[in-house]
């Protein structure tokens, strides 16, 4: 790949919005000779000068044939990217420190030798009529929003004499949850909405339903009957009976620490509460969620922790 960082800053980007097809047009497509292409051009120049000096018709014929080959290669290289369509598939939120997976769909007929690059990641694709669905990964270093790096689509097909490319700007951001840490409450702080410290015991809650098994779920809550009936591995969800106390995850109850550490500890408590199957409420400065339970409440709480003190952006999911 050629180093054209100074030139890339002047180029028009192809905007890529989540869920929408974007087509590479002539205004976003650029082409320049490769190193081999420049050598090929110098060779043609030298052949033209020699043909002129010696007045050799066969030399002129060979020069024009090679020139036609170069012009044909330029057209084929340019057309290999022209009108190629791509779109970004929904990106799931991740926890800080984990890689976000960006999956693309490409279509446009048979197109060999397509190079997809993002940072240090390089994928070489040979598109067929069915298209392709490549995946790229980018580490989410901190909570909040991860703005994906720009993509480069390029090709040197068929002869490697020229390189056509386009820059793709992703018009969305990936939601990044805080990295979960073990809970660390202030001494004497309680985790119940009604002030009690009663721990939940098997049989105290009512069966609320089933959901798909997730890694980390306690084996005591696995519904083995569903597995025996070949319905897959399911986890029992319990609902607090009337009067039972919901767990309380409170900003004020956290042990003294910086903001990011508190949010990470609260994220760990949310995951633990979701695995337990009990109802819980989340209390942040200026925001309260719940008490509730279930996957929707879990996602809402993690989102609130991820965006605490930050502005909304257009999500990729």
Image (tube, helix red, strand yellow):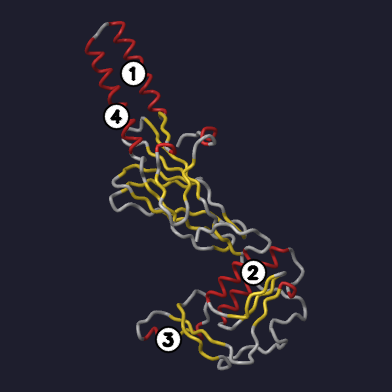
Q: Which of marks 1 and 3 is nearer the N terminus?
A: 1
Gap in angstroms between the C-alphas marked 3 and 4: 66 Å
| Quadrant hosting residue 274 | bottom right
Which disc number belongs to residue 72? 4
Whether tag 1 and tag 3 are in contact, CB under 8 A, the answer is no
The reply, left or right, for residue 199 in relation to residue 17 is right
Q: Which residue is drawn at 60% across and 78% down?
A: 273
Question: Relative to residue 48, is residue 229 depicted above or below?
Answer: below
Give the residue number, with chain letter if any, for mark 2: 181
Under circle 4, the secondary element is helix
Residue 113 horizontal/vertical position (percent): 34, 42
Under circle 2, the secondary element is loop
Residue 49 horizontal/vertical position (percent): 34, 10
Give the residue number, with chain letter if any, for mark 3: 224
Gap in angstroms between the C-alphas marked 2 and 4: 60 Å
Q: Which of marks 3 and 4 is nearer the N terminus?
A: 4
Give the residue number, with chain letter if any, for mark 1: 44
Under circle 1, the secondary element is helix
The reply, left or right, for residue 129 in relation to residue 280 is left
How many C-alpha atoms fall within 10 Å of the one at disc 4: few (<14), some, or many (≥20)?
few
Depth check, mark 2 against mark 4: the one in front is 4
Depth check, mark 1 against mark 2: the one in front is 1
Whether tag 1 and tag 2 are in contact, CB under 8 A, the answer is no
Q: Earlier in the sequence, mark 1 or mark 2?
A: 1
The single residue placed furthest to the bottom in the displayed view is: 203
The reply, left or right, for residue 232 in relation to residue 96 is left
Q: Which residue is drawn at 68% across and 71% down?
A: 287
Tag count in the figure?
4
Gap in angstroms between the C-alphas marked 2 and 3: 31 Å
Under circle 3, the secondary element is helix
């Amino acid at each position: 790949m050629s180093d054209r960082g100074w030139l890339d800053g002047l180029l028009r980007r192809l905007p890529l919005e989540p869920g929408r097809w974007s087509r590479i047009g002539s205004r976003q497509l650029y082409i320049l000779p490769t190193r081999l292409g420049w050598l090929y051009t110098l060779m043609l120049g030298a052949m033209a000068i020699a043909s002129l000096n010696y007045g050799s018709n066969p030399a002129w014929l060979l020069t024009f044939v090679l020139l036609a080959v170069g012009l044909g290669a330029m057209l084929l290289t340019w057309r290999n990217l022209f009108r190629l369509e791509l779109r970004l598939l929904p990106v799931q939120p991740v926890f800080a420190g984990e890689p976000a997976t960006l999956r693309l769909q490409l279509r446009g007929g048979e197109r060999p030798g397509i190079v997809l690059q993002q940072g240090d990641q390089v994928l070489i694709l040979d598109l067929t009529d069915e298209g392709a669905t490549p995946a790229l990964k980018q580490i989410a270093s901190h909570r909040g929003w991860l703005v994906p790096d720009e993509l480069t689509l390029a090709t040197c097909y068929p002869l490697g004499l020229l390189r056509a490319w386009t820059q793709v700007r992703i018009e969305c951001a990936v939601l990044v949850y805080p990295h979960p840490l073990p809970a660390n409450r202030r001494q004497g702080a309680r985790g119940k909405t009604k002030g009690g410290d009663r721990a939940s015991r098997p049989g105290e809650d009512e069966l609320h339903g089933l959901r798909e098994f997730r890694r980390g779920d306690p084996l005591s809550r696995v519904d083995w009957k569903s597995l025996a009936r070949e319905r897959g591995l399911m986890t029992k969800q319990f609902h607090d009976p009337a009067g039972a106390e919901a767990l309380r995850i409170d900003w004020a109850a956290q042990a003294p620490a910086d903001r990011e550490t508190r949010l990470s500890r609260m994220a760990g408590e949310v995951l633990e509460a979701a695995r337990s199957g009990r109802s819980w409420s989340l209390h942040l400065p200026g925001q309260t969620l719940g008490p509730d339970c279930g996957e929707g409440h879990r996602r809402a709480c993690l989102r609130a922790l991820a965006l605490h003190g930050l502005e909304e952006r257009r999500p990729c999911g």
